[in-house]
Each structure stands twice: as C-alpha cells, then as structure tokens.
C-alpha cells in the first residue's frame, strides 16, 4: 500500500514554495516532522502526506495525532454589533450562544446558498472567531457589515493546530492540567502551553475525541508544536495529514468539493437540522423557509462503492448513473480501514436519495463501479460508541 502511494507521489506535479502562498506558524515544524507533500487550501500550504493513510488512520482512531490546520483561517468579528452581524449571516440561532461556546455554522447567502461552514467560537463579549474552510467568507462578512453594523472584521494572529484521538486529553493534560477535562464539546478555554498563550476548543475534523489548540503568537509556532509532541511522546503521538477516511465516516463535509454556493443546508444530509426556527431575520431566511415548504430536488448523501480499495483521493468528480443515465456526481470516495469498505458522498435527485438505492459510478480511469446509497454518518450516528470502536451502525 505504501508503495502504491509512493508511486503516485512520484508522478505528482511539483509544488513550488514561494511567498505568494501563506505558511502557518507550524510549517517549518511539519517539514522537520517528515511531511513530504502539501496541498493548497485557503491560499495556504496544507500538509497532505506523512505516511501511508492506513497508518495515519489507526494512529488517529486508537492513539493521538497532531495536525497543522493553520489553513482554517480565523476571521474575527468584534465590536458593539458583533453579535448581531454573526447571527445575521447564519441560519443558526446564535442568540443563546454563550461566551465560551462554539457552533458549527453554515454561513448563508441571500438565496440560502452556503458561503462557508466555519467553526464559530464565541471567545469573549462582542468577540467571535470564524475558523473558515476554503472560501473568502471574511470578505463576505466585511461586505455585509459595511454601513450597517458597527463592527470590526479582521484577520487576527490566531492559528489552530489539532490534537486528535482518544489519548488527546491525556496529552494536553500534561501541558495545561486536569482542566482539559472540563472543556465540553464545542466549548473553549483560554490558557497557556509552555508560556505560550492559546485558546483550546473541543472541536476537530474527525468526530473522535480531540481538540484544536489556537496559538495567539505566530512567532512561537515551532515551540508550541514541539511542546505538544513532547507531551504526547509516551502515547506514541505522530503528525498526520487531515484524515479523509475518518471525516467521511463521521459525515463531515468539505466546502468547495462536497458543497458550494449553489447548495443550501437543506440539500445536505444531516445539515437540515441547522436551519433553526427563529424570530429574527437572517440572510437567506425567506429562501430557506420557502425551500423547506416546497422540498429540495436533490440531496448529498453517503455511498458505498464496490471494487478494489480506493487508495488515492479523487482528482475530479465521478459521474453517478441510474439505469445507464447520468443522474449525479460523486464528490469524495476513499477506502475506510475501519469499515473495510470504499465510502464517499454523492449528489443524487431526491427520488434516488434513500439508503439502499443502487447506482453505477464511473471512475476517472473509466472503471464502472457498483454503488449503494448509504445513510450518514457511516459510523456511530448517536455518538455512543467508545473511542476506537468503528462498527457500522
């Protein structure tokens, strides 16, 4: 398996490093840790490969891993109208989001389309952080605010790394003390690691136990990375790239590939619940209420794909067919070591969105694959499985 991956890397186009792309505070540390391939995401270098994906997967599921995710660009909204602006650009009702709490936040356009889906952190009174996927949603917030809201929309010196896996809390306990266990899911705490100010949130791109550690001084990135690595050494901590298999198992979506501005939260399996009833207005409210009444014409759902193990990420979408007619597209497909199946996401007409529906999929190599629509998430939908237990529900 490693040889197959290495052969693919050898055939890859060279990525040049230069000042026209941003580097995270942890970039030099990732090079020293053995990262050999980078992606470009959100105008920034994102580590893409350290080791065989199966090795990284099991390290995440059974132990503890560390990731450079500085590409989650932080946009800060602060000022007297910060609460109003942040609540106005999402279909979620944030009027009850307490200081110290976070939310998964669909950012909506006037027609209900998805502008972005950041992790939102309410870090202080009149101060919010939107930690963004790959789109210029900070400019969107700036445009919405112009002339209407008394706020500052800025890019603060805040950069996240993730510490993920069932041993993540034990690792961070060595650095910040037992208070790490007091951080509830999607809440945060202000603290220090090795004298470096950080904000730790119990969030991540895995749906396994884990945290994001936001450094507040970019000049200390290598020092923070090394401190976490040293604390996790006894638990076998290792740096990995974002784990595609685990995030798809968990029903976590990637903005720009799985969904775009042309899609609304109502079109995406599992995201419908985030269109929350509320009295106050927000951008897209009328459009989403009308769509909820009329019903959607298509849906993003899960899919199982038969055939050989898919060892590389899709470089383009794959057509999905029903009775020989193209009806949709596969946006992601990957081998799940835990489920021992190929899994992914597919856009299909609403009439074909029920689990168990059979489709044909054409890979970019021209292979015809039999596929079956699946419910999301693939693993542990009620979040009751113990860490590391990946039995399909």
Image: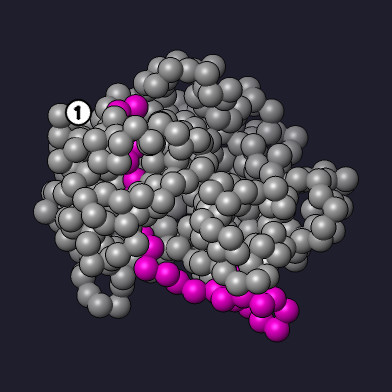
Give coordinates of residue 317: x percent, y percent: 49, 50
- Tell me if 358 is positioned left or right of 304 in this view: right
Give coordinates of residue 60: x percent, y percent: 31, 32
Residue at 51 percent across and 56 percent down: it is 123
Q: Is residue 156 magenta?
A: yes
Residue for badge 1: 235
Residue at 71 percent across and 65 percent down: it is 84
Give coordinates of residue 150: x percent, y percent: 66, 77
- Magenta residues span 140-169
**188, above or below 369, in the image:** below
- Name the one closer to the observer, 243 or 185: 185
Q: Is residue 206 magenta?
A: no
**66, above or below 120, in the image:** above
- Name the one closer to the observer, 35 or 75: 75
Regarding residue 344, the answer to whether it shows in the image is no
Tell me the SS state at disc 1: helix
Q: Residues within 10 Å of mark 1 (few under 14, many from 20)?
A: some
- Tell me if 152 is positioned left or right of 91 in this view: left
Question: Which quadrant: the N terminus?
Answer: top left
């Amino acid at each position: 398996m490693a040889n197959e991956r290495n052969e693919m890397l050898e055939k890859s186009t060279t990525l040049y490093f230069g000042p026209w792309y941003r580097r995270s505070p942890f970039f030099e540390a990732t090079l020293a840790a053995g990262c050999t391939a980078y992606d470009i995401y959100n105008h920034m270098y994102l580590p893409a490969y350290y080791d065989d994906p199966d090795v990284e997967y099991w390290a995440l599921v059974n132990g503890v891993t560390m990731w450079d995710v500085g590409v989650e660009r932080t946009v800060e909204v602060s000022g007297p109208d910060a609460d109003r602006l942040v609540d106005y650009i999402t279909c979620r009702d944030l009027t009850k989001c307490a200081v110290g709490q976070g939310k998964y936040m669909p950012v909506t356009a006037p027609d209900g389309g998805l502008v972005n889906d950041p992790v939102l952190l309410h870090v202080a009174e009149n101060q919010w952080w939107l930690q963004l996927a790959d789109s210029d949603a900070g400019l969107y917030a700036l445009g919405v605010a112009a002339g209407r809201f008394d706020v500052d929309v800025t890019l603060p010196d805040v950069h996240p790394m993730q510490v993920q896996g069932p041993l993540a809390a034990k690792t961070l306990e060595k650095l910040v003390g037992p208070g790490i266990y007091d951080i509830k899911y999607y809440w945060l705490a202000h603290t220090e690691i090795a004298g470096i100010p950080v904000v730790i949130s119990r969030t991540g791109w895995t749906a396994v136990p884990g945290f994001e550690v936001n450094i507040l001084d970019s000049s200390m990135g290598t020092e923070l990375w090394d401190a976490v690595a040293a604390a996790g050494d006894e638990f076998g901590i290792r740096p990995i790239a974002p784990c595609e298999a685990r995030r798809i198992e968990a029903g976590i979506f990637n903005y720009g590939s799985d969904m775009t501005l042309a899609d609304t939260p109502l079109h995406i399996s599992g995201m419908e619940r985030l269109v929350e009833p509320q009295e106050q207005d927000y951008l897209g409210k009328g459009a989403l209420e009308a769509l909820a009444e009329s019903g959607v014409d298509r849906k993003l759902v899960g899919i199982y794909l038969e055939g050989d193990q898919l060892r590389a990420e899709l470089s383009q979408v794959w057509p999905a067919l029903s009775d020989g007619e193209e009806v949709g597209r596969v946006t992601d497909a990957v081998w799940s070591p835990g489920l021992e199946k190929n899994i992914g996401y597919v856009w299909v007409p609403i009439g074909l969105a029920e689990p168990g529906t059979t489709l044909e999929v054409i890979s970019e190599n021209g292979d015809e694959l039999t596929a079956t629509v699946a419910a999301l998430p693939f693993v542990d939908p009620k979040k009751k499985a113990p860490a590391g237990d990946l039995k399909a529900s």
